[in-house]
Amino acid sequence: MAKIFCIANQKGGVGKTTTAINLAASLAAHKKKVLLIDLDPQGNATMGSGIDKNTVKATIYQVLINHATVEEARVRSETGNYDVLPGNRELSGAEIDLVNLDNREHQLKNALALVDSQYDFILIDCPPTLSLLTLNGLGSAHGVIIPMQCEYFALEGLADLVSTIKRVHKNINPELTQIGILRVMFDPRITLQQQVSEQLVAHFKENVYKTIIPRNVRLAEAPSHGIPGIIYDKSSRGAKSYEAFGAELIKRVKAMDKKQ
Ligand code: ADP
Ligand code: MG
């Protein structure tokens, strides 16, 4: 059975998609079978995986409204070595269509139940909202990875996200038990970033991942080539950090399984 993680943060531009793509490629490089789901109408995770969001035969949208199965809609990322359930602007209509379905918060979970024995990890790149799409992501997942920049306003909004996660755990998905904060776009030369990083660890303790993702221009360049950053320039600091993050997540999941 796959371990399912949402990459979520209702702020835009905080590194969700970069984390989703590079973590998928990192886990694949660690010989794990990975499905990456692009739940954001912007379709950046799809394009960044080398798949043209405008020419795919089906997307996660059709899966959510029962018009296609995961197996029909998925595409292989040849550059990243993982499967992708693509997303594009069709998804922006999903909110309205989903509202009319009885099982609206469980649509994704039900669809994934049919394929989760085929994967080790399923990663879900969420849109920058706490919408029905994000609820479907959280409703399917065992864990949430929250990418955060260590900046003054970073903690703002985190309380809302954590309370949404707790509500989902209580009312929709009791299997959602892991919250992990990933420090991204980190610049150790900036004192404020170090201070915020220390505050995060003091407050969230072991829920902060040990790996820190540095600000690295190679990670930002890679999407325009449709190649995950960790493949685009293997020797870059950004690539090495996501490689380490994949290893850390695999270790954590093993420890989680032992506890159960
Ligand atoms: P989100 O999905 O949360 O909106 P993105 O992953 O798209 O955020 O990142 C926002 C911008 O920051 C993008 O241009 C991306 O290339 C850049 N970026 C993300 N992570 C890094 C990093 N570690 N170093 C440098 N640039 C980054
Ligand atoms: Mg994004």
Image (cartoon, grey):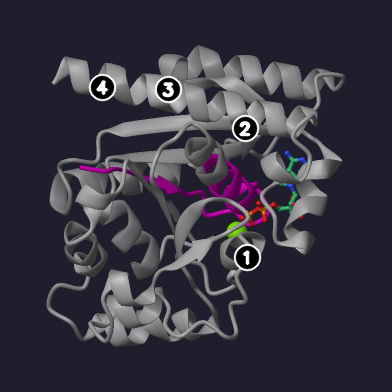
Which contiguous range is marked in magenta?
1-23
Residue type indicated by callout 1:
Asn
- Find residue 207 and name its label: 3
From the image, tell me which residue sits under label 4: 256
Looking at the image, is mark 2 or mark 1 earlier in the sequence?
Answer: 1
In which quadrant will I find the C terminus? top left
Q: Residue at x 18, y 82 (%)?
A: 101
Distance of label 2 from label 1 (alpha carbons): 18 Å
Where residue 157 sits in the image (x, y, percent)? Answer: 52, 45
- First in sequence: mark 2 vs mark 3: 3
Q: Give the Cα distance between marks 4 and 3.
A: 13 Å
Q: Earlier in the sequence, mark 4 or mark 2?
A: 2
Asked if the residue under mark 1 is in contact with the one under mark 2, i.e. CB atoms within 8 Å, the reply is no
Label 4 vs 3, first from the N-terminus: 3
Q: Where is residue 220 drawn, in percent x and y? A: 79, 49
Queried whether the magenta region covers residue 101, the answer comes back as no
**Closer to the eye: label 3 or 1:** 1
Q: Is residue 157 visible?
A: no
